Image (cartoon, rainbow, N blue to C red):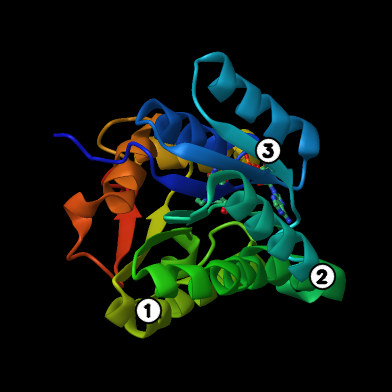
């Protein structure tokens, strides 16, 4: 199936490593021009270089999604370099873990700022442009924790990711009349540096709870992101797509 993505422009936040990097590389393989945005300038540069070395088009931008000036600068650079923005993948995320009685305000605020405010800022920054062009695909990487709660003390994270789902559904309604699709992905544990602070026993239990007997790899998500970014999914909006490998309690 041809996704007809060639020539489109995508911004991927958190594109320096993990899922974001996989999305950037997958887009580039489809001929998409990619803006690799990350708080870590070096890793963003590295992803962009990998794309360029293979003949693709990419621009690395250092941006903390929780800061409006950074997000606004990211969008300006994207438009300056590529002239349009067709796709936004709000992927950047962090997660603190602590029992509720021990959550310091700083941890709560940072989880909410990056995971929820970041999605709001990036959406706000591209909305006017996408509305004017009457075209856009916005994909928000939430988490199964946003649907079910977090099993290991990530309540601030889960609250933010649940917020992302409400925001996504609202954006689907608000931006739909402008031919902009907004969907959310809710993954379970994915093998990236992000899972490093999860208890080993929990990860093993997740493997056992999955009929495939393994946790997810980043490649398990790239096909879905490409599909949601393409016109092949034009009648899909306001959805939360849970991708958990069929996990059930053991
Ligand atoms: N890995 C998992 O188990 C898992 C499960 C469910 C959901 N997710 C979600 O998937 C997304 C990607 O996670 P990952 O596993 O690739 O994590 P990761 O830690 O490997 O990568 C996250 C990337 O985001 C960047 N980042 C962090 N804070 C940022 C900020 N303020 N501004 C811009 N960039 C920032 C980091 O530098 C990093 O490159 C996150 O939203 C995460 O919540 C991950």
Label 3 lies in ligand 1 vicinity (Cβ under 8 Å): no
Residue 244 spot, x, y in % from top left = 34, 48
Above/below status of 65 relative to 83: below
Q: Is residue 173 visible?
A: yes
Mark 1 highlights which residue? 175
Q: How busy is the neighbourhood of tag 2: few (under 14 within 10 Å), some, or many (20 plus)?
A: few
- Residue visible at 47% across and 78% down in the picture: 167
- Residue visible at 73% across and 65% down in the picture: 66
Label 2 lies in ligand 1 vicinity (Cβ under 8 Å): no
What numbered label is drawn on residue 222?
none
Q: Earlier in the sequence, mark 2 or mark 1?
A: 2
Residue 79 spot, x, y in % from top left = 59, 54
Mark 2 highlights which residue? 102
Secondary element at tag 1: helix
Q: Earlier in the sequence, mark 3 or mark 1?
A: 3
Residue 129 spot, x, y in % from top left = 50, 69
- Residue visible at 78% across and 31% down in the picture: 42
Foreground label between 2 and 3: 3
Q: CA distance from mark 2 to mark 3?
A: 37 Å
Residue 143 spot, x, y in % from top left = 47, 58
Mark 3 highlights which residue? 60
Q: In this orientation, which residue lies closer to the viewer: 244 or 218?
A: 218
Q: CA distance from mark 2 to mark 1?
A: 39 Å
């Amino acid at each position: 199936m041809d996704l007809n993505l060639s020539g489109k422009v995508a911004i991927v936040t958190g594109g320096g490593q993990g899922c974001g990097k996989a999305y950037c590389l997958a887009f580039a393989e489809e001929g998409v021009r990619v803006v690799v945005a990350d708080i870590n300038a070096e890793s963003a540069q590295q992803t962009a270089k990998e794309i360029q070395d293979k003949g693709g088009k990419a621009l690395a931008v250092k941006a903390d999604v929780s800061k409006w000036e950074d997000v606004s600068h990211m969008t300006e650079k994207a438009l300056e370099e590529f002239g349009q923005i067709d796709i936004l993948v709000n992927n950047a995320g962090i997660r603190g873990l602590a029992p509720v009685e021990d959550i310091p305000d700083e941890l709560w605020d940072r989880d909410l700022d990056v995971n929820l405010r970041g999605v709001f800022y990036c959406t706000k920054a591209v909305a006017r442009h996408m509305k004017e062009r009457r075209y856009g695909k916005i994909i928000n990487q939430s988490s199964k924790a946003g649907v079910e709660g977090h099993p290991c003390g990530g309540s601030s994270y889960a609250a933010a990711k649940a917020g992302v789902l409400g925001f996504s559904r609202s954006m689907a309604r608000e931006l739909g009349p402008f031919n902009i699709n907004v969907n959310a992905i809710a993954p379970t544990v994915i093998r990236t540096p992000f899972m490093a602070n999860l208890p080993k026993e929990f990860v093993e239990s997740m493997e056992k709870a999955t009929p495939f007997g393994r946790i997810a790899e980043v490649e398990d998500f790239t096909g879905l992101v490409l599909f949601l970014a393409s016109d092949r999914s034009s009648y899909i909006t306001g959805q939360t797509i849970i991708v958990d490998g069929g996990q059930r309690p053991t």
